[in-house]
Image (cartoon, grey):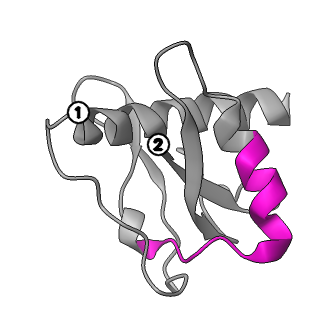
Amino acid sequence: MIARTIKNVAAAACVVAAAGLAGCASVPKPGKFASSTPPRLVAKADQTLAWDDPTAFGPVPAAEAARGASVCGSLDNDKTTFKATGYHPGALDANGNPFPGGGFYCVAK
């Protein structure tokens, strides 16, 4: 259940990033380090979920790279592939609860 929830949340967050790469808006980039205030998934007006502050993510640590590739890669489809460009150990879900093991910021390659 947790893996499915993480995948669904990541998918919702990546829709925004993918749209940004298509020219709808610029895609925010993670910061140089994880912020002391964790990013949180929030519902937008159209009821999709997006990270409230992608710049709160830091770089993906080497120890988390394989997991980030797996989480973000699970969003791949026939038109788009995704990669983890940010990680935060305390990223919060839409209910304000921390994701076990942290969260990734996925963007289209």
Circle 1 residues within 10 Å: few <14, some 14–19, many ≥20: few
Rendered image: mark on residue 4 = none
Choose the circle earlier in sequence order: 1 or 2: 1
Would you say 101 lies left or right of 61 here?
A: right
Q: What residue type is labelled 1?
A: Ala
Give whichever of 99, 61 is nearer the camera. Answer: 61
Q: Does the magenta stretch include residue 73?
A: no
Circle 2 residues within 10 Å: few <14, some 14–19, many ≥20: few
Prevalent SS, magenta region: helix
Q: Distance between the residues labelled 1 and 2?
A: 11 Å
Compared to residue 68, the image places residue 2 above or below, namely above
Compared to residue 6, the image places residue 77 above or below, namely above
Indicate the position of residue 104 as horizontal and vertical percent values. 62, 56
Q: What residue type is labelled 2?
A: Lys
Residue depicted at x 27% and y 33%: 19
Indicate the position of residue 46 as horizontal and vertical percent values. 25, 23
Residue depicted at x 58% and y 47%: 83
Would you say 100 lies left or right of 96 here?
A: right
Q: Give the magenta-colored segment's residue range.
A: 56-70
Which residue lies under the disc numbered 1?
A: 22
Which residue lies under the disc numbered 2?
A: 109
Compared to residue 48, the image places residue 91 above or below, namely below
